[in-house]
Image (tube, helix red, strand yellow):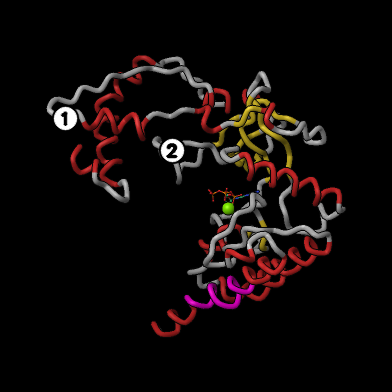
Amino acid sequence: MVAKAMDDDDEEDHDVLCEWIVDACLSYFRESTLDVPKEITFNDFYYPPTHHLKLLVSGSSLYPKATQDRGTMNAFRLMIPSGDLPPFSEVPRSKASDLRIISDTEWDDYMSEIPQKAIINDGTSRFFKPADDKKQLLREIDMHLRIRHAGLRDKIKVANLHSIVVSDDAKMTIGLLLDLIPSTGDSLYSHKNSALASEYHARWKQQATDTVKQLHSHDLVWGDVHPGNIVIDTSFNAWVVDFGGGSIVEFVPRKKAGTKDGDWQGVGKIFDEWILENNHLDRRAE
Ligand SMILES: Nc1ncnc2c1ncn2[C@@H]1O[C@H](COP(=O)(O)OP(=O)(O)OP(=O)(O)O)[C@@H](O)[C@H]1O
Ligand SMILES: [Mg+2]
């Protein structure tokens, strides 16, 4: 198992090995963590009490190295010192211990439990976007503020920035809370294969186009245009997400990344090519 995990490309064998280890340790975990709170907050997640287990594997010096490389969670890698960021005084702060984590049973994975959703004090759910990249975080906040200043907040289908999530002492920035777009799937990717989807193609294209037009009229560029950054809500409306910048060459040519032209090429690629690919297949199958 160890040998397989070592030269595993898609990490499945690695997961099998980890499960095998975790299974053996579960009863120990239960015994020593009787006081785990029922409701986990962001503080419990980012500043967890730690229990050290020593793994002894005879005949292999390889595995302990692998655990160092891949298995140790260092929560500080998932935060940015607040002092490295501008004050963003217009944006409220949410403290880690005031936010309850909503766990998503479909996606629960003990190997990677970065929260995706949070409940704030008044009981509303928000989307949580972790702060793992400073440059992206800065662009994201900046864009949301520009959208607000341009008066576009309620005119376009872009989720409002609610707050910046910080550690209880405010020294570390953990991520952002955005209004939660009620959706069943993750993004346009999960609608590519649905039978219903083709009825809505024109509408989604129109909605994305309207949003991009509005942004551009205020010299704001979406940037990372691809199907993963379009969320379809439960009423089948298309929302534009992710202002972190960057791009996927399949949708936005590298030279056009971050330009208005790049946005249009991305929208065209999604709705005039990518989304139709699958329909051809469907028709052939009939
Ligand atoms: N406000 C929101 N409400 C509901 N779902 C959202 C919201 N914002 C983003 N999502 C979903 O979460 C996914 C990831 O968000 P986003 O694209 O902003 O971050 P990212 O840095 O690209 O993350 P990843 O690398 O995991 O794709 C999106 O593809 C979308 O499905
Ligand atoms: Mg994205």
- Quadrant where the image shows the N terminus: top left
Q: What stretch is highlighted in magenta?
A: 268-278
Q: Does the magenta stretch include residue 243?
A: no
Quarter of the image for residue 115 reads top right
Residue at the front extreme, as displayed: 255
Q: What element carries label 2?
A: loop
Which is nearer the N-term, disc 1 or disc 2?
1
Q: Is residue 256 above or below residue 154?
A: below
Q: Which residue is drawn at 44% across and 40% down?
A: 108
Residue 142 appears in the rendering: yes
Tell me if 23 is positioned left or right of 104 in this view.
left
Quarter of the image for residue 156 reads bottom right
Q: Does the magenta stretch include residue 276?
A: yes
Residue 1 appears in the rendering: no
Name the foreground residue: 237 vs 151: 151
Question: How many angstroms separate mark 1 from mark 2 (CA)?
Answer: 26 Å
Identify residue for label 2.
Answer: 112
Q: Residue at x 53, y 73 (%)?
A: 274
Quarter of the image for residue 197 reads bottom right
Q: Residue at x 56, y 36 (%)?
A: 102
| Amino acid type assigned to the residue bearing label 1 in the image | Ser
| Amino acid type assigned to the residue bearing label 2 in the image | Ser
Identify residue for label 1.
Answer: 60
